[in-house]
Structures are given as structure tokens and as C-alpha cells.
Image (cartoon, rainbow, N blue to C red):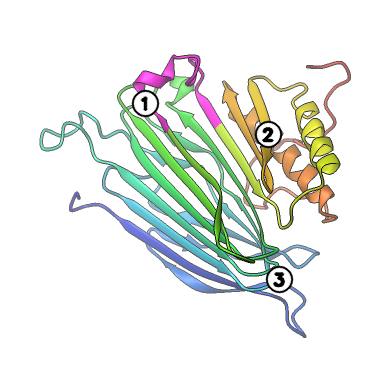
Amino acid sequence: MALSSWHGNAELRFLAPQAPAPATTHQGGATAPLKLQRAFHHPDGRCELPLLHTAGGLVGGDQLTIHASLGPASRALLTSAAAQKVYGSVGRSRLAPEGQWARQALHFNLEAGSDLEWLPQELVLFAGGLLEQTVEVELAVGASWLGMDVVRLGRSAACETLGAGRWRSRLRIRRLGPGEPHWELVDPLEISAASLEGEHGMAGEAVLGSLVWAAPEPLAAAALAELLADCRRDRQGLEGTMACGALAQGLIARYRGPSSQAARFWFTRLWARIRALRGLPAPDLPRVWPFQEQPLASPPEGSS
């Protein structure tokens, strides 16, 4: 590991409302370069907490670790205050010409009836950048987790591609009891030069996105089919390739295309669909997001 590397850490605990407090509260803290910003409470009591990476980006050898645990019946929305940048390290050092990996480890432990939405802003991987992300989610009975990732491979506006860089992600969701714990999803992904152009990889596109919902309860077949049909209709008016499918208890959606905005629009519409299915309030965009846009506006008639 480089001597100048960072290891930022955030430890968070969310607790359900207790009189006289009407909203979920949070405890914990963070070490540099991670910083907790001011929490905001939604009308339904959900605690929205933005995380800020004050270093301005990750370089080879840097590590970020975020551990959030939710007490029974608590509700939280975690987001990032800015897009995350991962700078190139391949070929930048004679001591490590193959580059050094930046790493991010996310651990989410949800107790019975809790509800976490993990909605970070876009990640931009510069040419020659190396990033490995692991996401471990452990859910008790009746807990719900919704997670989103949007990754741009290279700075497209500068005609830059990922080059010799690589992006790795491993998402694992495990459900506890009743009975034996079981895996709801194990989802390893890797993008490198070999998969940038292939049709079974990125097909020359610059943006990859994933949205996963682990539902609190199994969905009735008719309700799940209707949800998936609505999610597919929500692709209208957006550029890129979008697909979604059912999990044993939830859904997974993928975006591949040129536009991080299109990925964000589609995933926001899916977020709203899931909220509506659960009888929850319609979502508001996190307060720290800088976008002046309306992703929940109805698609134009006849668009595709």
C-alpha cells in the first residue's frame, strides 16, 4: 500500500423512532477523509444522511469502509454528497507500473422490519483507474434494502475510455431466518479492456448501472409481473439498453448506455414504483444532489 494512501471509515447505527422523537435517529461517526453531513428527516420519519468524501477522489491504495446497521423498524436513506472520482494508477509509477487498486467496502446489517435505501451519486473511473468494491448486505425477516450504482468508465466528455483500468464489484445479499440463512443474490461483475467492446460486455458504451431491491416479503406473482411491466414501460424516452428481472424476493435492473442521466432517470422511476408498491410516500431526490432535472416526469407519449 502506498504510504500516502487513505483509509476512511464510517460506522453508523440507525434507531427507530421513540417518543417524543417522531423520526429515525442515527449514531456513529466517520474518520477522514469521510465526513457525515447534516441529516434530514423526511415526513414519514426516514433519516436521510449524506456522506462526503473530502479528499476529492480515490487514488491507488486508498480504502473506504462504510458499515451501517439498522435497528428494528428504522428507516434510512444513505447517499453521497458528490460524485466519486477514481484516478488512474496504471503506468503512473515505476515502482508499481501495473497500478494499485483503490477499494471500497460496504457492510449493511438490517434488523427486523428495517428499511435502507443506498443511493450514492455517480462514480467516475478515470483511464487507468483500478477500483474494487464489495457490498455485503445481511437482512433479518421483514427488512428491505434498495441499492443503486451508476459507473462511468472514463471521462467521456474528454474522449477518454477506461483504457487499462479495471472495475470490480461483488454484491452479496443474505437473508436470515426463519430457518437457515440463505443467499438472495451473489452478483460479481468485472469490466476491463477485454469486456469494453464485446456485446456481452459494454458494447462500446461508457455507463453501467445496477439497481437491486431485496423486498421485505415475497411478492405475489401478479404484483411482481405488474411491477416489472411498469418498470419496462419507464424506459420510454431514455437512451441506452435497460433490462430488469425478478429475484426470488425482489428485482434487479441493469443499464448499459452512453448517459448517466438516463440511468439515473430510470432508476429513480423504479425507486418510485417500488415505493408505491409498498404503500410508502413518493420519493424526493436527496437534498444534496445537484441535478436540476425531473426524472419522475411522465415520459412523452409515443416515445420509446
Q: Please tell me which residue lies in front, 3 or 228.
A: 228
Give the residue at x 72% y 77%: 17
Magenta stretch contains residue 196: yes
**Which structural element holds mark 3?**
loop
Please indicate whether residue 187 sits to the left or right of residue 195 in the image. Answer: right
Residue 258 visible to the viewer: yes
Give the residue at x 79% y 50%: 275
When the figure is inspected, residue 64 is found, relative to residue 110, above or below; the finding is above
Query: Where in the figure is residue 219, as x and y percent of width and height?
Result: 78, 48
Residue 192: give its label.
1
**Which structural element holds mark 1?**
loop
In the image, farthest residue toward the bottom? 20
Disc 1, disc 2: CB below 8 Å?
no
Q: Please tell me which residue lies in front, 288 or 272.
A: 272
Report crowding for label 3: few under 14, some 14 to 19, many 20 or more residues within 10 A (C-alpha).
some
- Residue that numbered label 2 is attached to: 245
Q: Name the quadrant of the C terminus.
A: top right
Please indicate whether residue 272 sits to the left or right of residue 207 in the image. Answer: right
Spatial CA distance of label 3 from label 2 is 28 Å
Q: Name the front one of labels 3 and 2.
A: 2
Spatial CA distance of label 3 from label 1 is 40 Å
Going from N to C along the chain, the mark reached first, 3 or 1, is 3
Tell me the amino acid under the disc marked 3. Ala
Residue 159 visible to the viewer: no
Tell me the amino acid under the disc marked 1. Ser
- Residue that numbered label 3 is attached to: 73
Residue 293: give its label.
none
Report crowding for label 2: few under 14, some 14 to 19, many 20 or more residues within 10 A (C-alpha).
some
